[in-house]
Amino acid sequence: MARPRLLSEYFRTNGRLLGSVMLGLVAFWIIVLILLPQLSMLDYSFRYNLPPAEQGGPKDVYTLANYRHLIYGAGGGEGTYNTVDLMVFVRTIIAAMAVTVADLILCYPLAYYLGQSRGSGFVRLLVVLLIIPYWINEILRAFALRIVFADGGILNAAMMGLGLIDQPIDFIRADVALYAGLGYAYILLMLFPMYNAIESLDRNQIEAARDMGASWIRIHRRIVIPHAKPGITSGMTMVFMLSAGALAAPQILGGPSSLWFTQLVYQWFNDSLNWQQGAAYAIVLLVASITIVLTFMKIFKVNMGDIGK
Amino acid sequence: MAGGIGVDLENLWIRFGDFVAVRDANVNINGGDFFSFLGPSGCGKTTILRAISGFLQPSEGRVLIGGKDMAGIGPNKRPTALIFQNLALFPLMKIWENITFSMEVKGAGKAERRKRADELLEMIALEGQGDKLPSELSGGQKQRVAIARALCAEPDVLLLDEPLSALDLKLRQHMRTELREIQQRVGITFIYITHDQGEALTMSDNVAVMRAGVIEQIGSGHDVYDLPATPFVASFVGENNVFRGRILEVNGTEALIRTNRSGDLLAQITPAARGVLKPGDEAMMFIRPEALSLVVDAGAHEKTRLAAKVVNEEFEGNSYSVFLEGDGGKRIKMSLPNVGQDRIASKGEDLTLKYELRNAVVMPAGELAAE
């Protein structure tokens, strides 16, 4: 009985017309923009890559071949594994996690500072300054970073000028540029939810804890972090999902020997023109990412509903 | 804990930039006292509390707790516990965790904390509620949890920053009694901040009345109410009729005042102004509404009588408030207990009011509290 009551309550507060419009828009968003395209991708991923003439013909049947390819490679399961692609997959997931954690560590102190010095106009100015880079498009930002990290780039020049190093460091080959680029690309998606959460924390709670002798570490562990948990979760989810699925940054900033899993997906779609295979790879990445996020939410006891707060 | 630990403020100044929040405060709070700082908002009382708790460093002067200078000692190292105006309970922790947070900080084990929490919950009559969250308790219950949490640290001094202000009237009155009882039971010093004179008078052994960063008077509730030191105290604590005028004669502790509109009246000089007030000085004289009564015989002193016309009358249950107008439109309020008499006055009636000399107090003119 909970659902219908929820719905009638919804219509009572929003009115029949506005309620229907909002509901319609959400339905459009979910069905047309998310569900249908993804379902067709899912459908693709279970089909053979056939020439147009044979599509819909007797050969067009469902198959697990595309998924098998990711695990066993072209050979198709004679004890050999598709180590290259699997390694790329694992590396992408781990690197995306590392980027997420790095962003979390960078953003937490900043979010805490911004959140607790509430109200002042200067802080608001600082926040606006943080947004400015996001007015520049992602590809431009990635190339700008490439210039910074290049052999003859500003970073190497500065470090050599200061006498810290004799030889330029190949930041691109070492993937430093890639991780920096990914971290930079999504860092605000970590900062803002955390900042919003911490801003709503009553300062008196911190003072009360301090008055009772709590150390800074304990204050953060027991009071600030539990309070900011929904914000932290939503930030981490976004950064992880987006870095795992990033394409521009790995393409532009990645070293010659390192591939991001999305690049493999891209290659299947674009270079090999095998959408079925690409779809299977993309679905695997999507399912893995969602599973990881849900698992971590379970471990850290975060409810889905908290994130919307 | 016998006797408790006292708190002294010596020449305490607190400035924020050019703004002086506290000006040269000197206060001796005896150990085991219930002491209140009373004043309108913005008078600096919370600032004083923050200086005692250690969240704020004085610009000048000293804070001594138990005779020890607290300069440079942080809030966590002082033998004080602070109860915030909004209580600042930790919303995500269970009640028992809230109460024993100070033990958790010191590394006490869970069983020990649980046991202590149960003891304290019993003291505040919330047995068995330890596993609830603060949001599941009522306002008064949260109030008691905040007290238990503060007491759990076994402080020598408990600091309370208007903790009752969010409660409704009935509960607030109930909590006054309860706070006073708890204080007497644990025997430690309570320092209480409030803008509510009722709270200050009912609970405190001593009260400091503050205005704009200055402590105007320190004394028992009786002293502050009956013998206010300044016009501000007289008008801020309780209700008062003020009569402006000049001193005509001084006779020991009594003075005759030529009031601007109500003739010559006698009053006692407030202790703080004795020897200071001279004939010719501008003065203010105060008579409480409840100190006025109707003249029924001719026995009273002539110089303790007022003539006035009834303008309005309000029935307040336990008393009548009678609003009168004296000569020249001077407004006077009289309060009469409702003890079953017939109607005492009707609109437009001319009355003669009298008061006892000891109930009228005169002092040098000064600023009154804002209405």
Image (cartoon, rainbow, N blue to C red):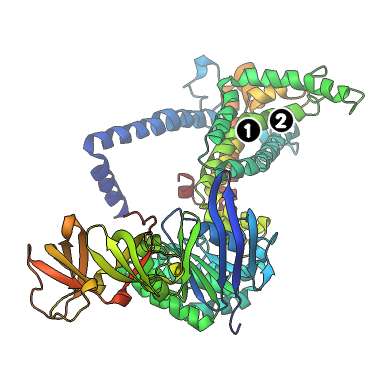
Residue A180 circle label: 2
Whether residue A245 is visible, yes or no, is no
- At 67% across and 64% down in the image, what residue appears? B70
Q: Amino acid at mark 2?
A: Ala
Label 1 SS: helix
- At 58% across and 24% down in the image, what residue appears? A132
Residue A59 at what x, y percent from top left? 52, 24
Task: Work out whether B359 lies above or below B51.
Answer: below
| The residue positioned farthest toward the right in the image shown | A166
Mark 2 or mark 1: whose residue is earlier in sequence: 2
Q: Amino acid at mark 1?
A: Ser
- At 25% across and 42% down in the image, what residue appears? A11
Q: Which residue is mark 1?
A: A243
| The residue positioned farthest toward the bottom in the image shown | B2
Residue A91 at what x, y percent from top left? 72, 36
Query: In front of the other: label 2 or label 1?
Result: 2
Q: Are marks 2 and 1 on the same chain?
A: yes
Camera-nearest residue between B158 and B26:
B26
Task: Work out whether B218 lies above or below A83.
Answer: below
- At 29% across and 55% down in the image, what residue appears? A1
| The residue positioned farthest toward the top in the image shown | A53
Kindly indicate whether the residue at mark 1 contacts the one at mark 2 (C-beta within 8 angstroms). no
* Disc 2/disc 1 C-alpha distance (Å): 11 Å
Label 1 crowd (10 A; few <14 / some 14-19 / many >=20) = many
**Position of residue B255 in the picture relative to residue A120 (left or right):** left
Specify the subunit that label 1 lies on. A
Label 2 crowd (10 A; few <14 / some 14-19 / many >=20) = some
